[in-house]
Image (cartoon, rainbow, N blue to C red):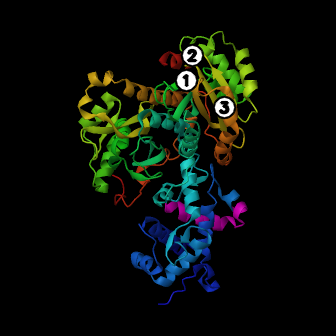
Amino acid sequence: MNINPRIGEAPNRYRNQAAQRVLAVLGAFVGRDAVHGVTDLARLLGMNKNMVHRALTVLTEEGFLVRDASGRRYQLGHRVLDLAGEEADEFDIRTLSRPVLEELHRLTGESVFLSIIVGRSRVNVDWIEGRGRRVSHSLRGRSVPLHCTKMSRMLLSYLSDQEIDAYLDSAAPLDSAAEIFPDTAGMTARTVWDDIENIRGKSHIAWGNPRSFGGAYIAFPALDDGGRPHGIITVGGPIERFSLERIAGFAGVMAGIVAPLQQQCRLFPAAPILLFGEPKQEAAHE
Amino acid sequence: MSSSARRALRILETVGRAERPLGVTEIARALGISAGTVFRGLDALERSGFVARYQASSRLVLGPTVSRLRHSVLARFPIREICLPYLRQLAFASGETTSLTVPVGYYALRLAAAPGTNEVTTSPSLGEVRPLVAAGGAGSAILAFAPADAAKRHAAWVKRAALRADLPSAAALEAVRRRGFAVDETAFASGRAAIAFPVRQDGRAIAAIAIEGPVIELKTLDLKTLAANAELDRWIGIVRTIEALARARPALFVNPFDHIDPDSIALNDHAPSGPPR
């Protein structure tokens, strides 16, 4: 039998309208929270309710749709999971950032970090260590409360004012972990807010920290379209080698390296941030 | 209406389950229908993006609509986005790929993963569905915390489905409960195992978080040695935080298939024949 391989150009007599209607109904369930009833599907697809009802019957019998918990509407069913497909292209900030970290490390020779918010903490989820004396001396994947260290406060600064206030209220007194994080000595909500106002709106932040290992740092945010943080990328080195003057000289080139990642990050919504956990306990862990 | 539509869905499943792009004749042979019928079904499927041509050939693969539907199903589990930052933290802390698995009926759905940082790591396929009994440590972690009546129904289902994998023994599940995690011996690192933690809510496991590399020595599995393992302690701490979040914000941990009778969910040709007893 000679079958025309150009299926897209099948003549009208080959058209299979019943199948097309069923597939159109199934296709309407693409979307984050797609739950539909007969009436809205009919309106959405320009079909009569009877056609929609028959399509829903086929799709539920086959398991491609199921009734939702209310029993009145329909949601995607388990059978869709059976259609094995490659789930490539998932947004993963660490995978996307890795080449950027490598390039920043090649350029500077210093330590580079990718940090994200996990619960109420900053966590470094990737880093490349600098050569010789370096600024990274922590456990892999440890949690640092969001008010402790400039890197944490940079992540904190991209949250909403309400979220920051709520965080600071619940984390008070803010200087309780000063033995572990010297930069929190004498810290109050006001001093954190001053810091946040200096951070917000800037393309990058550079700072020296004479107390912690005598380091100097520059950090770039990776934000989504709404300004929510995916993470920050920080380069840090001992101040005698990586001075603020040297950082200023590098800043433009580093910004150029980070820019494509920043553009890519805008295309994907950042993971929801719940600021959940007990900051005092976390501080005690450190 | 229904027969041609059902045929189109059968064709879609055939294309979806094939390990390589299929031609019209192969699909016809697989389904025992004429090539012309396949042709008409494919026309509808291709028009709506459910199937697509493989590299401009006449062979077919799943199309972009299927990918969007699968993503839409995964996105219906809010636990996925909630857990991703924690998975990344665990992946970096352990160096190994970490993943989140949730039950869908008697199956395990690998819902999210964070790639490990070690040079050699596993690369799990996202959205993969296997029966819980064939889902390694993640499956055992979930089964160990199933309520008694659900466990009984599950055991009956496994028997009916005649799966190649066996139900974990009562002693093995008891060990998971005592230890707080399941172990999964890996073929490539003898004497070591990957581990999977249950994520518990009201006493039952609503998910499992696995560290998929050989992170633990099997000979250290007695409770005394485990208690002295500071790394393990940190990993457990991270899972406990997620459990505390599930207690505080249960709406974020709702499984969109929880209200479906698990006996009615059949996937992967593992469906047991006949009605549940």
On whether residue B135 falls in the magenta region, the answer is: no
Label located before the other in sequence (2 or 1): 1
Magenta highlight range: A42-62
Residue type beneath disc 3: Ile
The residue carrying pointer 1 sits among few (fewer than 14), some (14 to 19) or many (20 or more) residues within 10 Å by Cα, namely many
Q: In this view of the protein, can residue A95 be seen by the observer?
A: yes
Which residue lies under the disc numbered 2?
Answer: A181
Where does the image place residue B85, in percent across and percent down from the top left?
54, 36
Which residue lies under the disc numbered 1?
Answer: A144
Which residue is at the front of the view, A275 or B42?
A275
Per the model, the C-alpha gap separating discs 1 and 3 is 25 Å
Where does the image place residue A49, in percent across and percent down from the top left?
68, 64
Label located before the other in sequence (1 or 3): 1
Res A232 label: none
Q: Is residue A229 found left or right of B23 in the rendered image?
A: right
On whether residue A49 falls in the magenta region, the answer is: yes
Residue type beneath disc 2: Phe
